Amino acid sequence: MKTVFNSIVLVALATMVQADFSEKFRDHFSNLPELLKDLSRKSQLGPAGSFGGGNHVGGAVTKKIPIIIVHGGGNSAGSFEKYRDHFIKQGYSNETVYATSWGFPTETIQQSLEMKCEYVKRIRKLFFLVASFTGGKVDIVAYGEGAPIARKAVIGRNCVDTNQDTGNSLRNEVRAFVSVRGQNGGILCDPSGDKRATCLNMDIGLNCGSKFIKDINAIGKHWKEAVHSIHSIVPLLPQKTNCGSDSCGIPYSKVYEYDFNGVEQNVNRVVEILKKL
C-alpha cells in the first residue's frame, strides 16, 4: 500500500512542476556526479526534486546574494516553486534562488518526521555548492519543519542519531538565516498519551525535549546577529510547547510578527528583512 501511495505522490509532483537544477549548474559540478545526483533528487521525485542555477557562470559572483529555500515537512522543492516565482518578482532570478528536497514528502509529515542526519547532510551540501557556484555567501530561508534541519546543517558538528561529525559551523558561508514559522523549539506533544512517532522519539523527534531540539538550541552554537525568526500572529500553530518553550523560537534571534495572507505576502516579508541587512 505504501508503494502505491508513494507512486501516486511521485506522479502528482511530476505533473505539478517542471524543475531541476539548470544545465549550467550541473555542468559546473560534472566532476561530482554522485553528489549532484543526491541533491537533484531526480531519481526519487523526478522534476520536483530541485531547482536553481539559471544561466549563471559558475564561480562568478552574483549581483544579488542567492537565497536557498528549505521547504517544510511533507513537501518537496517542487511544491515551493511558487515561492521561488515570487522571489523572482521581487528582484531575484533563477540564478539566485535554489532548493532541494531534503526528504521524501510521505516520510516527512509532522506525525512521523525524524530529524535524520541524512537530511542535515543533504541540505548542508547544497549550502556549500550554491556558495561555490555563486562566488560568495548565501541567505537561507527555512520554513516549518525544514528550519530545524537547516539550522543543524549550519551549526554542523556531530549528528544526534549517527554521531557523525558533519564539520564546522558554516557561519562564514551564510550571511543570514530567516526562519519562517520554523519548528525550532519543537511541537506541542501531550506527555500523557501522544502517539505520534515524532513526539515519542526523544532522540531525533520534534518533541521539545528531544536531544535534537536541545542540540540546535544550545547557547553558543549559532550566531545571533545573523538569525531572524518570523512568527505568525495568526494562531495556525500552537505557540507554546509542553516544555513551555516557544515552538517557533530561536534563542537570541530577532523576531518579527506578521499576519500572513498567502505566499506573496510571505515572500514580501522575507525580502523586507533581507533588504535591511
Image: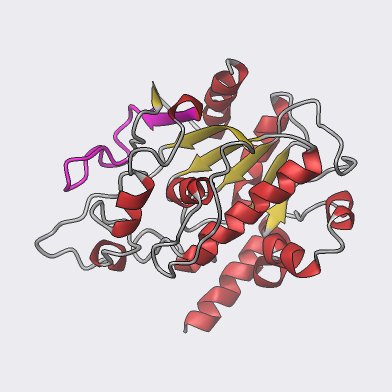
Visible in this render: residue 99?
no
Q: Which residues are magenta?
A: 227-247
Q: Quadrant of the C terminus?
A: top right
User: Is residue 169 depicted above or below 162 in this figure?
Assistant: above
Residue 70 percent location from the top left of the image: 56, 47
Give the image's coloring scheme: secondary structure
**Nearer to me, 225 or 7:** 225
As drawn, is 188 to the left or to the right of 133? left
Quadrant of residue 122 in the image? bottom right
Magenta segment includes 124? no
- Residue at image point 62% right, 64% down: 12
User: What type of secondary structure mainly makes up the magenta span?
Assistant: loop
Magenta segment includes 237? yes
Residue 116 percent location from the top left of the image: 45, 65
- Residue at image point 52% right, 23% down: 269
- Residue at image point 31% right, 63% down: 198
